[in-house]
Amino acid sequence: MKKLLFVTVAFISMVSLNGCASLYMSEAIPVKEDYSDLLPPLTPIMDTQSLENVFGIATTNSSGSSYSTHHLIGQTGMSFNNGYSSSTTYRDPAIHDLTTYFEKDATTNICQQYGTRKGYITCQVVNGYSIVRIGMRWIGAYPLFGIPYLLGMPSKKAQSSLMVKIDIYDKSQNLVGSYTSDFHYDKRYVALYYGYSAGNAKHKTALEAFKACMKDVKAKIRADYDRLNKELY
């Protein structure tokens, strides 16, 4: 009986991690908005360190070795140490996608894409988090043999909340505008039939929260368009 319970729980737990919803590459590409008053061309720069502070990076040492050689030079014995190591760094895919989204959104919906650059537009994540919570997963996994998962009960919940700041500089690197979004939040479930996988759910919430932040900031930039345009030219 215990063996059957263990096998059932393990099977249902693995199945419950695979939702049917998909995350498409096109979601990381901003849509051209119906707005004609764009700022002059600017160079977009994302503060990737601020993204890493939220989404994190991990470095795993994979191999390494060291050795030493000894030589007698005159009456002096000398030792030379040598070694090497290699490591692999893993970055959350959201870091790349949010950077790409900002750069494309800036040159599509904030400033003109072509022409002589009149300055810079930078993006920094001021604060935020991105996590996957297990929640009450054990209720479906143990006492009820995982059956609620087969009925569509979520096994996990991904959540992201972000606040971003956009700064605009002229070609002499003088700050001419600074705009901070409100906090924006998004959540997605890991579940059968309608949910995402754990990785895609977290990725999706990060992207949607970031899009909401950009929408917020773009409205503030457009309200200040006349002044910014004059400062940059």
Image (cartoon, rainbow, N blue to C red):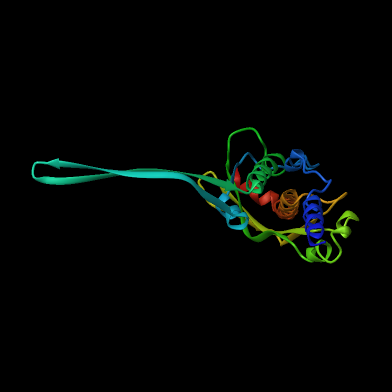
Q: In the rendered view, tell whether residue 110 sits above or below residue 143.
A: above
Numbered circles on residues, count: 0
- Pick the residue in front: 165 or 119: 165
**Residue at x 72%, y 42% (from the top left corner):** 28
Q: Is residue 22 left or right of residue 64?
A: right
Give coordinates of residue 21: x percent, y percent.
83, 46
Residue projecting furthest to the top: 115
Q: Position of residue 106 (x, y in %)?
A: 67, 43
Out of 12 and 79, give the one closest to the viewer. Answer: 12
Indicate the position of residue 66 as horizontal and vertical percent values. Answer: 35, 45
Report the quarter where the N terminus lies: bottom right
Identify whether 35 is placed above or below 134: above
Residue occupying the point 70% across, 43% down: 105
Considering every residue shown, the one lying at the far left of the view is 75
Q: Residue at x 85, y 51 (%)?
A: 192
Report whether 169 appears left or right of 78: right
Give the residue furthest to the front. Answer: 1
In the rendered image, which quarter is residue 113 located in? Answer: top right
Which of the image's four quarters has the C terminus?
A: top right
In the figure, 147 relative to 33: above or below? below
Tell whether 101 sits left or right of 50: right
